[in-house]
Amino acid sequence: MQTSAYAHTLVDPEEAAARLEHYRERCAARGVDFLATAVQQEYSRVIGEPAAYPAFGPLWWAVKRILRAHGRDLGTCDDGPMAEAAALRGADGAIDEALTMAAADVFRDHYYADYLEGSRDFDAPDGDSYRLVDPDMERRIRAAVGFVE
């Protein structure tokens, strides 16, 4: 795997790979594709509860790109450098969408165990603090609580 050093600070790639293998086995037993299932589940999760997006941490931007690539558009706001740094990659250096989705699932587990719900501050690749704010999702959060812009 040619995953960035930063991605390694977010999620242990081996833990993500093990999670992916487990999910692929479960999906295969049901005759469904893991990536298609993950895309639909995560899209449904953030559409139903937009305030849940920070639980993906900096992986959010990679997840959002994957959702968009699979026809689940959540808006045009993007943090390209963070999406590239946080995504997990295969041996060929290309972003591995399935592995990145599994990594996002692992990160979310750690988020709920280690962060206060709603936390948006994370370590950045350069060692500084990174605040996750997606204006597209923030608009959805405000709309969900009845705030009209």
Image: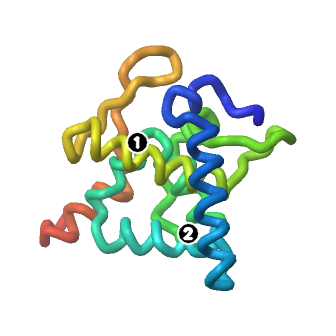
Q: Residue at x 47, y 72 (%)?
A: 41
Q: CA distance from mark 1 to mark 2?
A: 17 Å
Q: Position of residue 147 (x, y in %)?
A: 13, 66
- Left or right side of 85 for 2: right
Give amino acid for label 1: Gly
- Tell me if 47 is positioned left or right of 149 in this view: right
Task: In the rendered view, tell whether residue 68 sits above or below residue 103.
Answer: below
Q: Disc 2 designates what residue?
A: 39
Badge 2: residue crowd in 10 Å (few <14, some 14–19, many ≥20): many
Image quarter where the N terminus lies is top right
Identify the residue at image location x=47%, y=53%: 105
Q: Specify the farthest residue to the right.
A: 92
As helix, strand or loop, the secondary structure at mark 1 comes to: helix
Q: On screen, 125 above or below 66?
A: above
Q: Earlier in the sequence, mark 1 or mark 2?
A: 2
User: Where's residue 140, x and y in %?
Assistant: 29, 65
The quarter of the displayed image where residue 101 is located: bottom right
- Give the labeled residue for mark 1: 57
